[in-house]
């Protein structure tokens, strides 16, 4: 692979920045300064250093959780100059992509990885991964709303699967609820709650397949712990709800 790509795959710098480092003479291959970004590198054979630090092409997959703030779109770039999640991630995360989506006006747990297999398990509808949301809505949510959402309501693009709705607080003109879904349709939580007469004021995803952003300030991210990654992989081996389990968790 080309030297500038090797540097970007190592996660140390973007391909363009790597090219600058190379032209500045800061990169050595097997001890020799190389200023040609196209120099061919064989990862298992060549030793590449930047300012004396050994760069490794890390074969290990990477996993992060971001506590997404509202007002940020889930895209790694945006031609309209809107704030996007890429702006919140550091250089070392280069190459990861978001696992699924959250609306710009939703905050909370958003996973990133470069592990395509796990991302597929986490997002494909047939696996029914559990997502938990906390919403503040207009009006008083009552037992009848809980029952209707629990039985599965019909949305304009078809029936939504039954979901668990818990009332955390219902007083005055607003209520706070927690809703657990095993689907991920467009603006699904907002549409389900609106279907039972409650417009969503704020929406936060508090858990994605058991991963939370507890203790992470809004806009910050952290790598998943080894235990968390193992937990996700274990769960992804479980049979999908399409085989008759009715959802995990
Ligand atoms: N449901 C929504 O309405 N919005 C989200 O961002 C996620 C789930």
Image (spheres, rainbow, N blue to C red):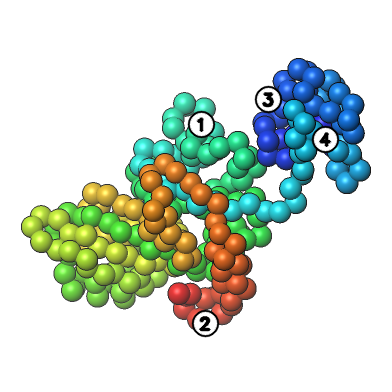
Q: Nearer the viewer, mark 1 or mark 4?
A: 4
Q: Is residue 243 above or below residue 105?
A: below
Q: Earlier in the sequence, mark 4 or mark 2?
A: 4
Report if the beta carbon of the residue with label 1 is closer than 8 angstroms to ligand 1. no
**Most extreme residue toward the left, as rendered?**
172
Instruction: Identify the image quadrant of the N terminus.
Output: top right
User: Where does the image place residue 141, in percent across and percent down from the top left?
Assistant: 17, 65
Residue under the image location 43 percent in, 59 percent down: 212
Confirm or deny contact between disc 2 and disc 3 (CB under 8 A): no
Query: Which disc is residue 244 wearing?
Result: 2
* Tag 4 residue: 48
Confirm or deny contact between disc 4 and disc 3 (CB under 8 A): no
Q: Nearer the viewer, mark 2 or mark 3?
A: 3
Q: Nearer the viewer, mark 2 or mark 1?
A: 1
Q: Nearer the viewer, mark 4 or mark 2?
A: 4
* Tag 1 residue: 78
Residue 11 visible in the displayed image: yes
Instruction: Identify the image quadrant of the C terminus.
Output: bottom left
Label 3 to label 1: alpha-carbon separation: 20 Å
Label 4 to label 2: alpha-carbon separation: 51 Å
Label 2 to label 3: alpha-carbon separation: 50 Å
């Amino acid at each position: 692979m080309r030297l500038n790509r090797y540097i970007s795959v190592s996660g140390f710098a973007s391909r363009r920045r790597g090219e600058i480092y190379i032209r500045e003479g800061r990169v050595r291959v097997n001890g020799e300064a190389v200023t040609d970004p196209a120099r061919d590198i064989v990862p298992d054979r060549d030793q590449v250093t930047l300012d004396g630090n050994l760069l490794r092409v890390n074969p290990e997959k990477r996993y992060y959780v971001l506590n997404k703030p509202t007002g940020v779109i889930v895209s790694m770039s945006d031609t309209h100059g809107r704030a996007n999640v890429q702006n919140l991630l550091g250089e070392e995360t280069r190459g990861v992509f978001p696992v699924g989506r959250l609306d710009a006006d939703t905050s909370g747990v958003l996973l990133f990885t470069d592990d395509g297999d796990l991302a597929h398990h986490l997002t494909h509808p047939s696996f029914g991964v559990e997502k938990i949301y906390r919403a503040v809505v207009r009006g008083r949510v009552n037992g009848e709303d809980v029952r209707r959402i629990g039985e599965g309501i019909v949305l304009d693009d078809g029936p939504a699967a039954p979901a668990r709705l818990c009332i955390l607080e219902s007083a005055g003109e607003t209520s706070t609820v927690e809703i657990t879904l095993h689907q991920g349709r467009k603006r699904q939580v907002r549409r389900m709650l609106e279907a039972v007469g409650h417009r969503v004021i704020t929406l936060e995803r508090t858990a994605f397949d058991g991963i939370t952003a507890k203790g992470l300030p809004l806009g910050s991210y952290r790598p998943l712990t080894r235990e968390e990654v193992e937990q996700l992989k274990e769960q992804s081996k479980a049979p999908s709800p399409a085989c008759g389990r009715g959802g995990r968790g």
